[in-house]
Amino acid sequence: MVKRGLLLVYTGEGKGKTTASLGLTLRAIGRGMKVEFLQFIKSPERTYGEQIALRKLGVETEQLGIGFTWTKTPEEHREALKKAWKKVKNALQDETIDLLVLDELNNALAIQTFPIEDVLPLHEVIEAIKNRPPRMHVVITGRAADLALLEIADLVSTMEPTKHYYSDQNISAVKGLEF
């Protein structure tokens, strides 16, 4: 049995990154583990299927973002990222959490349309992950994972699309499949 927490990263352009983290969450719950599920981009103003299900299972889940970067001003996003990072730093020090899912953290770290380094510094993220409680597992999802995160990860899975109904059939997000 593994005596230390692992860092798992799900990245890539394909569908399934959050879904994979939800599968791990379900497995961890089944084993009596305490799970916290924090979502970086998604807004608390909307309701998501995974949020509903996780709450029914007793998992703390929180949407820390304010939506896609084009939906609000850069300053609004920066403020949300600053608050999100504070919440995540605290979670990364919580010795009672067995599995911490940082959904769409990769997306947040990859923002280039406005500066984020001062509110979500990559070097701090990496240090906080490295210095988490020894038995805490961390899952990070989202497109465009930074190479520095990939280097410290114990597992990296890249989801690549072969065929997708968004682009191939012009079908938009489907309730129950994407949200």
Image (spheres, rainbow, N blue to C red):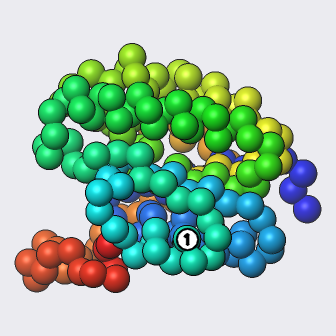
Image height of 11 relative to 57, above or below? above
Number of other residues with Cα within 10 Å of mark 1, as a class: few under 14, some 14 to 19, many 20 or more: few
The picture quadrant where one finds residue 72 is top left
Residue 18 is left or right of residue 2, and the answer is left
Of residues 104 and 179, the one drawn nearer to the viewer in this rendering: 179
Per the image, label 1 sits on a secondary structure element best described as helix
> Hey, what amino acid is under mark 1?
Arg
Q: Is residue 18 above or below residue 103?
A: below
Q: How many marks?
A: 1
Q: Position of residue 25 (x, y in %)?
A: 63, 68
Q: Is residue 112 left or right of residue 49?
A: left
Q: Residue at x 22, y 49 (%)?
A: 68
Q: Is residue 169 something that shows in the picture?
A: yes
Q: State whether residue 176 is above or below residue 147.
A: below
Query: Which residue corresponds to the image point at 53% horizontal and 30% vertical from the top-left?
Result: 86
Q: Residue at x 41, y 46 (%)?
A: 64
Left or right of 71 in this view: 22: right
Which residue reaches farthest top? 118
| Residue placed furthest toward the left | 170
Expressed as whole percent of the image width and height from the top left, the position of residue 32 reads 80, 71
Q: Nearer the viewer, residue 30 or 159?
A: 30
Q: Position of residue 138 (x, y in %)?
A: 65, 49
Answer with left or right where residue 102 lies relative to residue 171: right
Q: Position of residue 127 (x, y in %)?
A: 64, 25
Quadrant holding the C terminus: bottom left
Identify which residue is drawn at 62% across, 56% down.
Answer: 36
The image quarter containing residue 175 is bottom left
The residue labelled by disc 1 is 55
> Is residue 5 at all visible to an observer of this figure?
no
Camera-side residue of 33 and 56:
56
Task: Quadrant for the N terminus, please.
Answer: bottom right
